[in-house]
Image (cartoon, rainbow, N blue to C red):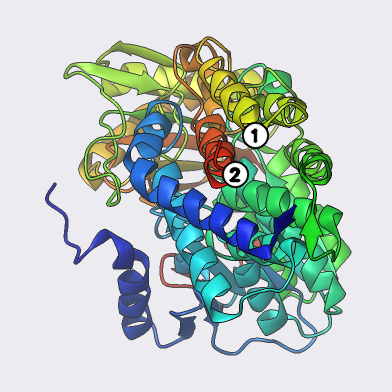
C-alpha cells in the first residue's frame, strides 16, 4: 500500500484539518466531524445538511457554502456518519426555518439519519428529508435495500440548495429535492478496485483486462463483469441503461463523474461519447458537468447521471454557488 | 442470577473477541460489502469499554443501555444503529433490577432482536445478523452454550443465501457463497455471553 497518509485511524481527521486550512469560508469542527458554512445559521433560510462516508470527496464537505449545503457530516471511510454529528450539524444551521436532511439510500445512512431526525426534533428543530436513490444498476429493488444514492446527490444538493438560498420554506425545498431525485438516474462503471486505508489492499479482485458494470461508490463489486470495453462502448452501455429507466421528455443536465483515479482527459473523452449517444437518442442537453464530484477513493472509472429539468430547475441549477468544489455566478 | 459484574464481563469478552476477529470480519465484509465491519466494530467496542470504565453503571440494564448508546455514537454505518439498538432495547427490557435470571435475559434479548429486525426491516433468511440472533434467542431457553452453537450455525447457514438487505443485497446472485459479516459478529457476541457464563 502506498498512500499519502499517516495512519489509517487519522485519515478523516487529517483531511478535515487540511480542509479547514484551505477554506476559511468553512467552519470545520475536526473533533466532532462537522463542516458548516461560516455564516450559519442564515436568518430565515432553511438549512441543508447532508453527509455520508468519507472517501467520496468532494462530496459532501466540498459542497458546503452559499447556494448549496449548509453543513456536511463526514463519516469514517465508506461508513455513514453517526447521529450525534447530524444533530450537531442540524442545530448549528437551523435559523428556525427548519433543516432538510439529504440522505443517500444506503442502509447505514438511512438508519443514522432517521435516528438523528428524531433527536433533532426533540431539540425543537423541524426536519425534512430527501432520500436519493438514482442508481439504475440496482435491479429487483424490492429484493434489495433499494436503489443506491449516487451522482444525483449533487443535483439534489445544488438545486434544493439554490431554492433554500432564495428563501423557499422547508416544505418547498423538500419538494424540489424530491422532484430532482425523481428526475435523475445514474449508472457507474469501475475500471479498477478501490483500496481503503483500513484494509490496505484492494477490496475485491478485478483481473487485468476486465471491468465491472453497475458499481456503487463504496468499492463493492457491481452487477456484472465483462472484458474491457472502449470509451464508446461504455458510453453506449451506461447512457442506454439510464435512458431506459428515465425516458426523458425534455432537456437534461448531464453529469460525467470520475470515481477518483480517472484522468480528466479520459473523462472529457468519455463525455464526448456520452454526448454522441444522447444526440443519437434525441435527448437535448441543457448543461454538462465533467469532473470528479462523487468519488470512490482511488477507484478508476466513471458514472453518468442525467437529470431531466424544467425551466424552474434549470434556473435553480444556474443560480450562484460558492463552495470549495462547485462555484459559479458569484 | 446475573449481576452487573456479569454484564460488564460479557461486554469485555465481546470487545476482546472483536479485537481478535476484526481482520476476519473485515475480510468477510470485503467479499460482499465494503471492507470495514471489523474496524467499525473495533472502534465501537473500544468506546464501550472506555465508557464502562469511566462511569460504571449500577445495573445490568443500565450497562447495556450505556453500551448501546456508545455503539450508536461511534460505529456509524448500519452496524452502529443495529448493534446499538440490540443492546439498548435489551437493556431497557431488563429494567432496573440489580440482578436478572437467565430466562429474564432470554426474554429481554428477544425484545432486542425484535427491535433490530424492525429497524433494519430484515427477517430470517435475508442474510443478516438476524440469521444468527433469532436462533440464538430461541436456544437460550436451553442454555447459553446452546445459544452460542445456534448463533454460530445460523451464521454459517448464511453462506448459500442471497442477500436481501444491506450493501450485499446490491450484488444479487454474487452474494451467494459468502458468510454474512453481521451474522458472524453476532455469533461472536453470543459466544462471548456463553463464555462469560462459563459454558
The x, y position of residue B156, in whole percent, is 51, 18
Give the CA distance from mark 2 to mark 1: 7 Å
The residue that mark 1 highlights is B144
Q: Residue at x 62, y 63 (%)?
A: B5
Tell whether B185 sits left or right of A203. right
Q: Residue at x 44, y 40 (%)?
A: A217
Question: Does any portion of residue A163 appear in the rendered image?
Answer: yes
Q: Earlier in the sequence, mark 2 or mark 1?
A: 1
Q: Residue at x 43, y 23 (%)?
A: A222
Camera-side residue: A44 or A195?
Answer: A195
User: Does A311 appear above or below A328?
Assistant: above
Element at label 2? loop
The residue that mark 2 highlights is B197
Question: Are circles 2 and 1 on residues that touch, CB within 8 Å?
Answer: yes
- Name the mark on residue A108: none
Q: Residue at x 37, y 74 (%)?
A: A16
The number of callouts visible is 2
Amino acid at each position: 500500500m502506498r498512500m499519502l497518509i499517516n495512519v489509517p485511524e487519522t485519515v478523516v481527521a487529517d483531511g478535515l484539518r487540511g480542509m479547514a486550512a484551505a477554506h476559511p469560508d468553512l467552519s470545520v469542527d475536526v473533533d466532532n466531524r462537522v463542516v458548516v458554512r461560516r455564516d450559519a445559521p442564515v436568518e430565515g433560510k432553511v438549512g441543508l445538511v447532508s453527509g455520508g462516508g468519507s472517501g467520496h470527496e468532494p462530496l459532501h464537505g466540498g459542497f458546503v457554502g452559499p447556494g448549496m449545503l449548509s453543513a456536511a457530516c463526514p463519516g469514517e471511510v465508506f461508513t455513514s456518519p453517526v447521529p450525534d454529528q447530524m444533530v450537531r450539524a442540524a442545530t448549528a444551521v437551523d435559523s428556525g426555518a427548519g433543516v432538510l436532511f439529504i440522505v443517500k439510500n444506503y442502509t447505514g445512512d438511512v438508519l443514522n439519519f432517521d435516528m438523528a431526525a428524531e433527536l433533532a426534533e426533540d431539540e425543537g428543530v423541524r426536519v425534512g428529508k430527501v432520500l436519493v436513490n438514482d442508481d439504475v444498476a440496482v435491479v429487483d429493488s424490492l429484493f434489495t435495500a433499494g436503489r443506491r444514492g449516487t451522482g444525483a446527490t449533487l443535483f439534489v444538493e445544488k438545486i434544493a440548495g439554490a431554492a433554500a438560498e432564495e428563501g423557499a420554506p422547508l416544505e418547498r425545498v423538500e419538494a424540489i429535492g424530491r422532484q430532482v431525485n425523481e428526475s435523475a438516474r445514474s449508472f457507474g462503471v469501475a475500471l479498477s478496485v478501490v483500496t481503503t486505508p483500513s484494509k490496505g489492499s484492494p477490496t475485491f479482485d478485478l483481473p487485468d483486462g476486465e471491468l465491472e458494470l453497475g458499481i456503487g461508490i463504496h468499492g463493492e463489486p457491481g452487477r456484472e463483469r465483462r472484458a474491457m470495453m472502449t470509451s464508446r462502448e461504455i458510453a453506449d452501455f451506461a447512457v442506454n441503461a439510464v435512458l431506459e429507466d428515465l425516458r426523458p421528455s425534455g432537456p437534461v443536465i448531464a453529469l460525467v463523474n470520475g470515481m477518483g483515479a480517472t484522468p480528466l482527459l479520459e473523462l472529457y473523452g468519455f463525455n464526448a461519447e456520452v454526448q454522441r449517444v444522447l444526440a443519437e437518442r434525441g435527448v437535448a442537453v441543457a448543461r454538462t458537468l465533467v469532473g470528479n464530484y462523487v468519488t470512490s477513493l482511488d477507484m478508476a472509472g466513471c458514472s453518468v447521471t442525467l437529470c431531466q429539468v424544467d425551466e424552474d430547475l434549470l434556473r435553480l441549477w444556474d443560480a450562484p454557488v460558492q463552495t470549495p468544489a462547485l462555484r459559479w455566478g458569484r | 442470577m446475573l449481576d452487573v459484574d456479569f454484564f460488564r464481563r460479557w461486554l469485555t469478552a465481546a470487545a476482546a473477541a472483536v479485537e481478535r476477529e476484526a481482520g476476519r470480519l473485515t475480510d468477510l465484509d470485503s467479499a460482499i460489502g465494503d471492507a470495514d465491519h471489523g474496524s467499525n466494530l473495533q472502534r465501537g467496542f473500544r468506546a464501550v469499554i472506555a465508557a464502562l470504565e469511566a462511569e460504571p453503571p449500577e445495573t445490568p440494564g443500565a450497562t447495556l443501555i450505556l453500551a448501546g448508546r456508545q455503539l450508536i455514537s461511534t460505529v456509524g454505518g448500519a452496524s452502529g444503529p443495529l448493534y446499538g439498538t440490540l443492546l439498548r432495547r435489551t437493556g431497557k427490557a431488563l429494567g432496573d433490577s440489580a440482578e436478572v435470571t437467565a430466562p429474564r435475559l432470554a426474554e429481554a434479548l428477544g425484545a432486542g432482536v425484535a427491535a433490530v429486525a424492525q429497524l433494519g426491516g430484515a427477517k430470517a433468511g435475508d442474510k443478516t445478523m438476524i440469521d444468527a440472533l433469532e436462533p440464538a434467542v430461541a436456544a437460550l431457553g436451553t442454555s447459553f452454550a446452546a445459544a452460542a452453537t445456534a448463533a454460530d450455525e445460523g451464521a454459517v447457514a448464511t453462506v448459500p443465501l442471497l442477500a436481501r438487505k444491506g450493501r450485499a443485497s446490491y450484488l444479487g446472485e454474487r452474494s451467494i457463497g459468502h458468510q454474512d459479516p453481521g451474522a458472524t459478529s453476532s455469533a461472536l457476541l453470543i459466544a462471548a455471553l456463553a463464555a462469560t457464563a462459563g459454558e
